Image: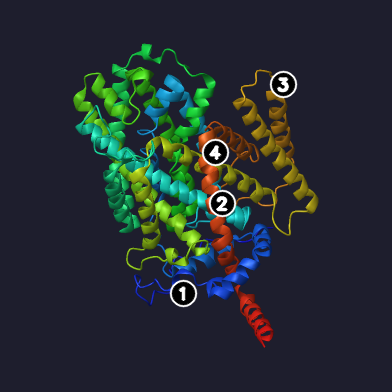
């Protein structure tokens, strides 16, 4: 019924003959036929429309992602991780990636004490996405994560859009963490001015005029550690994460003991819209588990370790986040919460000056481990994208000694360091959330496609029914989001799209499934993926016009790159057997014209 998805071999491919660092020739960067010379590139551009059609319809396979693409890296990644490592990698990656940086900002500006409800909403949405990721990671344990999964189920072009957003997410996420790290470090020295270590440049526009050299240094150090080895980074992460768990427990207990229930009134100062607007942004706090999914290629027993590691850690993290958000809003009135270093300033204001240093250390530790795990995950995403030739395959090379993709790590490190040097946290957070939510929504769609459509197996009639129902689920979710954001008061405008969503999902549940998971799968399909689509679209709709504008500008730049570079390189790889004869025929025709 479906093709075999056995795990890739444990032994790495043949060893590297050339020096790892002497790979900057044109053949290493652009080895594809389309970039061989000017005439080849001109011919490739003339074929853009036909090649785009080819790529839109092309889908990868489990076997290709598992066995063929890793050969580009020349050296295999080391299988050294267990479920215990994954739990603490997820904990280290997620806790610190937003709870210490976004909670104060959103509690003050959008949700007030109801920020705890925002965390419940975004936590539920994140858990649904975790289920989707887990099934794919068990079936296809490769470094590409969502990029590989989407390439198999939704095709090459959609995977590229996801790849662009993954790269954007990696850059913006790391840059945001670097900025927050410097804010907390500064608050330990000067509580009144978290920006005092930054350099203000008046001629730059607001949001980009505070230069942050500390953030750059932090990013360089964290990524340097990540490049040294996966096992070493994993060990360091789980040791520090276990210690920080006790300190987080202290923060929660003191928050409840010294906090005042009167600070929770009014609980919904910005209404339900404020809660959902904050939920869309605090989703940042839950991101990071997708980076752990990219470790599947280095996991000893993916079918057991990945479900236990991801689902177990995210359930624990969701409870911790809600308790931390509640304790913060009890410690301080939401109107007085500091936007940049909320927890440490809150302790200082209640007279526990010594505790603010402890909180800042916990926050800095959390952000540091998030950077460590994030840099590993970002590099592995980038590695698989390079293996597919969407970016130069040079970045797919794995270092023979460390077993890590050093070139890919350097690419994300340098780019995120530049962004963190200029951009403020509020500018970064909305762009990050839009990219992340878009990818998670596509993952839910991909899971439905995987269950209901298998090429050459699913009858055309069932395929058409599935597409219609998927379109109705997607359309009704968008309609609900639009109605909500237009602030419509009539109940009929909510009932109609909600009913369409429910009936479409119900109808899809009666369609036959043509692929079932071999080991572990998402329960209640199609209900959970359909709910994930709806929740992610609702959160995207709550981000505001500016986030949409920034997202579409970034997407337009990505599309231009794809049309001029990525399209032709991936087409060449997919059709490399016929390119030689095609190029010879073109040369022969050109010579006849000259004669």
Q: Which mark is residue 27?
A: 1
Question: Which residue position is annotated with label 2?
Answer: 161
Q: Earlier in the sequence, mark 1 or mark 4?
A: 1
Q: Which callout, 3 or 2, points to the residue nearer the camera? A: 2
**Disc 3 and disc 1: Cα gap in Å?**
61 Å
Name the image quarter holding residue 189.
top left
Residue located 34% across and 74% down the image:
19
Farthest-out residue, bottom: 595
Report if the CB atoms under discs 1 and 2 are less than 8 Å apart: no
Q: Earlier in the sequence, mark 1 or mark 2?
A: 1
- Residue 101 at x, y = what percent? 36, 34
Residue located 45% across and 35% down the image:
315
- Residue 155 at x, y = what percent? 63, 56
Q: Neighbour class for label 4 at 10 Å: few (<14), some, many (≥20)?
A: some
Secondary structure under tag 2 reads helix
Question: Which residue position is annotated with label 3?
Answer: 492
Report if the CB atoms under discs 3 and 2 are less than 8 Å apart: no
Q: Earlier in the sequence, mark 3 or mark 1?
A: 1
Name the image quarter holding residue 173.
top left
Q: Earlier in the sequence, mark 2 or mark 4?
A: 2
Report if the CB atoms under discs 3 and 4 are less than 8 Å apart: no
Q: Which mark is residue 546?
A: none
**Disc 3 and disc 4: Cα gap in Å?**
28 Å
């Amino acid at each position: 019924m479906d093709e075999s998805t056995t795990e890739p071999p444990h032994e790495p491919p043949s060893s590297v003959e050339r020096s790892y660092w002497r790979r900057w020739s044109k053949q290493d960067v652009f080895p594809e036929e389309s970039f061989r010379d000017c005439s080849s590139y001109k011919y490739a551009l003339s074929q853009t429309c036909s090649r785009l059609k080819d790529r839109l319809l092309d889908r990868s396979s489990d076997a290709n992602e598992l066995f063929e693409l890793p050969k580009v890296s020349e050296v295999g990644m080391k299988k050294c991780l267990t479920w215990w490592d994954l739990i603490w990698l997820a904990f280290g990656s997620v806790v610190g990636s937003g709870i210490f940086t976004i909670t104060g900002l959103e509690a003050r500006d959008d949700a007030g004490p109801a920020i705890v409800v925002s965390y419940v909403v975004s936590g539920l949405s994140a858990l649904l996405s975790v289920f989707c990721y887990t099934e794919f990671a068990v079936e296809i344990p490769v470094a590409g994560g969502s990029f590989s999964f989407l390439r198999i189920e939704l095709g090459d072009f959609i995977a590229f859009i996801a790849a662009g957003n993954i790269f954007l997410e990696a850059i913006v996420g790391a840059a945001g963490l670097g900025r927050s790290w410097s804010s907390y470090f500064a608050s330990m020295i000067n509580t009144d001015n978290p920006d005092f270590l930054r350099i203000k440049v008046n001629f730059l526009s607001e949001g980009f005029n505070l230069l942050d050299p500390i953030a750059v240094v932090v990013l360089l150090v964290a990524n340097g550690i990540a490049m040294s080895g996966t096992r070493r980074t994993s060990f360091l992460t789980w040791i520090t994460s276990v210690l920080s768990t006790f300190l987080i427990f202290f923060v929660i207990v003191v928050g409840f003991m010294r906090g005042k229930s009167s600070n929770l009134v009014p609980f919904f100062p910005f209404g339900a819209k404020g809660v959902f607007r904050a939920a869309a942004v605090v989703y940042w706090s839950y991101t990071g588990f997708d980076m752990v999914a990219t470790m599947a290629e280095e996991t000893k027993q993916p079918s057991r370790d990945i479900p236990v590691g991801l689902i177990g850690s995210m359930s624990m993290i969701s409870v911790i986040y809600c308790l931390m958000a509640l304790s913060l809003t009890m410690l301080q009135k939401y109107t007085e919460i500091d936007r940049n270093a909320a927890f440490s300033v809150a302790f200082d204001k209640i007279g526990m000056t010594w505790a603010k240093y402890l909180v800042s250390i916990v926050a800095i530790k959390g952000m540091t481990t998030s950077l460590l795990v994030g840099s590993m995950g970002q590099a592995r995403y980038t590695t698989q994208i390079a293996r597919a030739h969407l970016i130069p395959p040079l970045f797919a090379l794995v270092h023979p000694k460390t077993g890590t993709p050093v070139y890919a790590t350097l690419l994300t490190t340098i780019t995120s360091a530049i962004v963190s040097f200029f951009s403020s946290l509020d500018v970064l957070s909305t762009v990050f959330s839009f990219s992340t939510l878009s990818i998670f929504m596509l993952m839910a769609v991909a899971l439905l496609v995987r269950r209901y459509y298998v090429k050459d197996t699913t009858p055309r009639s069932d395929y058409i029914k599935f597409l219609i129902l998927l379109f109705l689920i997607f359309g009704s979710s968008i309609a609900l989001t639009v109605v909500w954001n237009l602030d419509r008061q009539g109940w009929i405008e909510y009932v109609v799209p909600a009913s369409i969503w429910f009936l479409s999902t119900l109808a899809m549940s009666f369609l036959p499934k043509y692929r079932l998971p071999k080991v572990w799968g998402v329960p209640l399909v199609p209900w959970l993926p359909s709910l994930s689509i709806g929740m992610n679209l609702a959160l995207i709709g709550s981000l505001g016009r500016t986030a949409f504008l920034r997202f579409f500008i970034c997407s337009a730049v990505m599309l231009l790159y794809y049309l001029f570079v990525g399209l032709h390189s991936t087409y060449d790889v997919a059709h490399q057997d016929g390119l030689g004869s095609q190029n010879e025929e073109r040369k022969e025709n050109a010579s006849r014209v000259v004669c």
